[in-house]
RNA sequence: GCACGGUUAGCUUAGCGGUAGAGCGACUGGUUUACACCCAGUAGGUCGGGGGUUCGAUUCCCUCACCGUGCACCA
């Protein structure tokens, strides 16, 4: 027998111990040469700067559940981990450190800075990897990848070169989203619309040809008026048609600008007149193109005004300049009025500053394989779960714009393009530099981080690994990166592997706080998962979270739920402790000696296995966790173990023996079923109890159900009746305020030969009698149970009035229910149209109610 | 503006055509052969409002309100 188990489960040492052993035993390593069927999943690579958040916990717990279950199903499992170099985020972290030391990246120069980032990465990067280990993740760490590993980088560059040669990648001077803080272009996906309280300024421009006549114009951005090179109205707008072709005076710097007609002008908005600033607005740029307007850029890359804005504005921040421009308009008598105005302003996702539409030279990708990608998702070749995300996905991809893939950063994959020093039109696009590098300059930009992430599922695998494990089975991710990542991976996979990258995409919900707000650093409403692990254990955290994470629905996080997870682990621990105190394990349930209670618990187990399997089939992890929770706590601990306490005392050795066998059978199954959710505690108990010498991770999940021959319906029914009767009698005791610890005489008035020792114990009877001829005196507390009439003769307590009142209440309740049923049965339409089974069920209920009422009335009438 | 979710006991939620279920919290009682991270029991719900379909609607349809998310607009 193993050492005795302590009374409260202490996760810390157990979790650390097993994780260490799993790594030592290389339990998580995937073998491409294995003959077993494969199962694979690639981790959504967290930022190398990242620390574990609740989102990661949710995400990675689900992946671990899937991976561990697959392992137990006898599959060769690859869960491939790694981190993302996270261009802006990482560069920013290192720049901040430099600034703290009084340096800038320019002091180091490009190469020096990049080296500095690598140093930082080696020293501090990837903390999250260790945190994932604390969570128990069964990743194959021997295959950990980083998006800037030499091999990975090479694939990124090859991809660029290949797409360039195929004509998908091109360079162009275009309007892009400019982040003035980080001073780089961004893709459309990195711009977040934020509802902002602003001001709509109504100003007036004088018409050159009609002095004294003014056009009134509404704008939110007066600071860009120095870049106005035109004024536009809708050609159908009769208010302004006479001005088309004439000119306005731009007030400062004073200049004549043409009045043009353009369909894009909304006559309803503002005054119906638009000032056209082609350098600082996407729509204005298009209008400018159509009418040959000049482009005057009045902003510096950092969001301050440049010399073209005029002397008094130079160097002012754009928001300062806005105020100043409005003031100046006022001084000139050109500001008509100001109006409070709520509008959406595009913010940089990373920099959290308003982005600036800016004309610049950038690299763009025209997406490949769009049709195949739409088709793969629409036809469920890659299946989205829940499938409502298909619509979102289709809408995005059908309106897709070319992807701006260049970033003005130093940290990242440098664009493999060189320009000839003497002949700028000569470009060299290749993964290798030109043979005469001294005559060439390499492009200064790096690629968008997502341009490396979109290759993740296959760029992380070598050829033999791909052969065995690609495409992967499941991808688990939050829906907020459906465009950034999921869609693009499918396209890349079609282009380079000729197939889908994953069979299923499971979109988790977002974790919110109890007020429904997103968790964020600035709100400080995000609990630290490591702190939760320290207090509740990784298993408790995992199970608690999984039990409240409904399919594709956002999750209101409540620490109470994690506490319940810990409590559940403790319950499991103690149930095993109870079992261990009874002696060593006994394998195999014997059909001939099965008790009613055993049959009942095995029946419940089988139903639970059914629910669990359905849950997994539907990716309904909450359903899986919840079924296991209910079965184990309620059916097994509350009912079966309590019943077992009686059976284990039986003088019949066969009964004792088989009860132990059933306990062991169920516990073994429960440990296996729970292992994907609570890997550490189940491993500890599995080995400590002696269920197997090897790791539970590889225990066969094949046959979890009890043999149907054990499930005699009449026996199951008997157990259920006894349980129901137990509740009724406990209820009766409570009504009479008899402490649950106090033994009290219980008489079952029924002709029967069954053994009621379990019942007697469950209701804490002392003594318990079965007496078909019991002479029930008046006022003796009484209840109707499925076993028959139960009396509770209490010494010195015969309160006729109280008992009568209690029964009267019960009668009233029954009568109300009876009335409902009878009303339905009296309804001809119901009897005729409802399915006969439903009608029959109602008739049966009517009979049952009548029978009960009769017996209750008998008690009061006497 | 368009689209997709959600609205069930004080809180977190399950159910999704045929007697509304759980956990937490509240209340009552409890050191009973593991577990107070526990056990037994009680109270608490016109299932967001209105209309429709149906013998019957929390469940299906329409509509409104509110909350959330995405997309578009964003002068």
Image: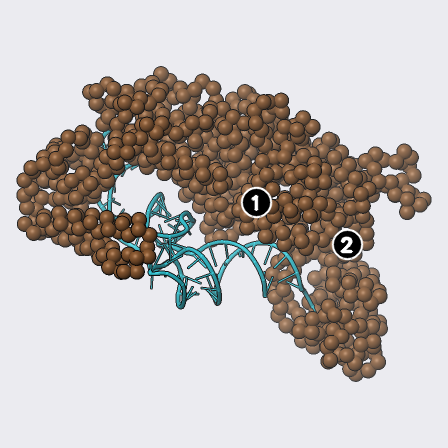
Pinpoint residue A662: horizontal percent, then vertical percent: 32, 25
Front position in the image: A547 or A182: A547
Q: Residue at x 63, y 72 (%)?
A: A339
- Residue A37: image tag: none
Give me the chain that's cyan. Answer: B
Residue at position x 47%, y 48% in the image: A556
Which residue occupies the foreground of this view, A366 or A618? A618
Q: Quadrant of residue A653?
A: top left
Q: Quadrant of the N terminus of chain A?
A: top left
Q: Is residue A527 visible?
A: yes
Residue A842 in percent (x, y) is at 26, 51
Q: Identify the residue position indicated by label 2 in the image.
A: A301
User: What is the C-alpha distance between the residues marked 1 and 2?
Assistant: 41 Å
Label 1 sits on residue:
A384
Height in image: A84 above or below A295? above
Q: Chain letter for brown?
A: A
The reply to whether residue A453 is in sight is no
Circle 2: element type = loop
**Image point (49%, 52%), residue name:** A516
């Amino acid at each position: 027998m193993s050492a005795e188990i302590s009374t409260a489960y202490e996760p810390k040492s157990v979790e650390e111990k097993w994780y260490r052993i799993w790594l030592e035993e290389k339990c998580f390593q995937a073998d491409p040469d294995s003959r077993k069927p494969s199962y694979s999943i690639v981790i959504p690579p967290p930022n190398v700067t990242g620390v574990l958040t609740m989102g990661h916990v949710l995400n990675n717990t689900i992946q671990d559940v899937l991976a561990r279950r697959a392992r137990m199903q006898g599959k060769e499992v690859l869960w491939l981990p790694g981190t993302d170099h996270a261009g802006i985020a990482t560069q920013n972290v290192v720049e901040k450190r430099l600034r703290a030391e009084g340096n800038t990246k320019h002091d180091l120069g490009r190469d020096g800075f990049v080296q500095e980032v690598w140093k930082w990465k080696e020293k501090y990067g990837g903390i999250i990897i260790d945190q994932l280990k604390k969570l128990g993740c069964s990743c194959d760490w021997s295959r950990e990848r980083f998006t800037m590993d030499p091999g990975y980088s090479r694939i990124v560059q090859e991809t660029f070169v290949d797409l360039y040669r195929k004509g998908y990648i091109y360079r162009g001077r275009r309007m892009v989203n400019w982040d003035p803080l980080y001073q780089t272009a961004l893709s459309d996906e990195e711009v977040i619309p934020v509802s902002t309280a602003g001001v709509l300024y109504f100003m007036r421009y004088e018409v050159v040809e009609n002095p004294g006549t003014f056009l009134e114009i509404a704008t939110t951005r007066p600071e860009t008026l120095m870049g106005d090179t035109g004024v536009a109205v809708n050609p159908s707008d009769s208010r302004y048609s006479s001005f088309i072709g004439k000119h306005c005076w731009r007030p400062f710097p004073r200049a004549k600008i043409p009045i043009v007609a353009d369909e894009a002008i909304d006559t309803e908005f503002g005054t119906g007149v638009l000032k056209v600033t082609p350098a600082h607005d996407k729509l204005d740029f298009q209008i400018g193109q159509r009418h040959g307007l000049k482009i005057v850029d009045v902003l510096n890359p950092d969001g301050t005004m440049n010399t073209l804005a005029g002397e008094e504005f130079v160097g002012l921040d754009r928001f300062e300049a806005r105020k100043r421009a409005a003031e100046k308009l006022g001084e000139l008598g050109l500001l008509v009025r100001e109006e409070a105005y709520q509008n959406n302003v595009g913010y940089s996702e990373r920099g959290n500053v308003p982005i600036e539409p800016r004309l610049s030279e950038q690299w763009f990708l025209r997406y490949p394989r769009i049709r195949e990608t739409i088709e793969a998702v629409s036809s469920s070749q890659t299946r989205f779960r829940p499938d409502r995300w298909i619509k979102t996905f289709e809408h995005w991809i059908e309106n897709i714009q070319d992807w701006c893939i260049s970033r003005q950063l130093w940290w990242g994959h440098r664009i493999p393009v060189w320009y000839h020093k003497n002949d700028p039109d000569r470009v060299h696009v290749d993964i290798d530099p030109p043979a005469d590098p001294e005559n060439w300059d390499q492009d200064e930009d790096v690629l968008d981080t997502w341009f490396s992430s979109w290759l993740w599922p296959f760029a992380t695998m070598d050829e033999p690994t791909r052969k065995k494990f690609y495409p992967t089975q499941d991808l688990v991710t939050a829906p907020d990166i459906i465009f950034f990542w999921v869609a693009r991976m499918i396209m890349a996979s079609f282009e380079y592997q000729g197939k889908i990258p994953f069979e299923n995409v499971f979109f988790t919900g977002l974790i919110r706080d109890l007020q429904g707000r997103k968790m964020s650093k600035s709100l400080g409403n995000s609990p630290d998962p490591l702190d939760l692990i320290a207090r509740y254990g990784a298993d408790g955290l995992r199970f608690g979270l999984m039990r409240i994470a409904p399919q594709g629905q956002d999750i209101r996080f409540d620490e109470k739920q994690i506490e319940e997870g810990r409590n559940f682990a403790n319950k499991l621990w103690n149930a095993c402790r109870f079992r261990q105190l009874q002696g060593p394990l006994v394998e195999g349930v014997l059909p001939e000696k099965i008790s009613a209670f055993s049959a009942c618990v095995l029946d419940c187990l089988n139903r639970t296995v059914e629910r669990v399997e359905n849950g997994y089939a539907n990716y309904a992890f909450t359903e899986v966790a919840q079924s296991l929770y209910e079965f184990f706590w309620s059916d097994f601990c509350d009912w079966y173990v309590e019943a077992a306490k009686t059976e284990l005392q039986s003088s019949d050795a066969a009964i004792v023996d088989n009860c132990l066998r059933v306990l062991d059978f169920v516990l073994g199954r429960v440990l296996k079923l729970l292992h994907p959710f609570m890997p550490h505690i189940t491993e500890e108990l599995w080995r400590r109890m002696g269920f197997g010498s090897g790791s539970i991770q590889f225990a066969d999940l094949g046959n979890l159900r009890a043999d149907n021959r054990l499930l005699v319906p009449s026996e199951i029914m008997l157990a259920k009746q006894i349980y129901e009767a137990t509740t009724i009698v406990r209820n009766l005791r409570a009504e009479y305020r008899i402490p649950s610890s106090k033994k009290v005489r219980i008489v079952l008035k029924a002709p029967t030969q069954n053994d009621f020792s379990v019942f007697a114990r469950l209701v804490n009877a002392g003594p318990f009698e079965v007496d078909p001829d019991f002479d029930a005196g008046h006022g003796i507390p009484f209840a109707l149970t499925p076993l028959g009439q139960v009396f509770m003769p209490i010494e010195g307590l015969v309160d006729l009035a109280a008992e009568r009142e209690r029964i009267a209440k019960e009668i009233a309740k029954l009568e109300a229910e009876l009335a409902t049923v009878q009303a339905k049965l009296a309804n001809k339409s119901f009897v005729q149209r409802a399915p006969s089974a439903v009608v029959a069920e109602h008739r049966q209920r009517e009979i049952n109610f009548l029978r009960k009422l009769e017996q209750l009335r008998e008690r009061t009438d006497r």
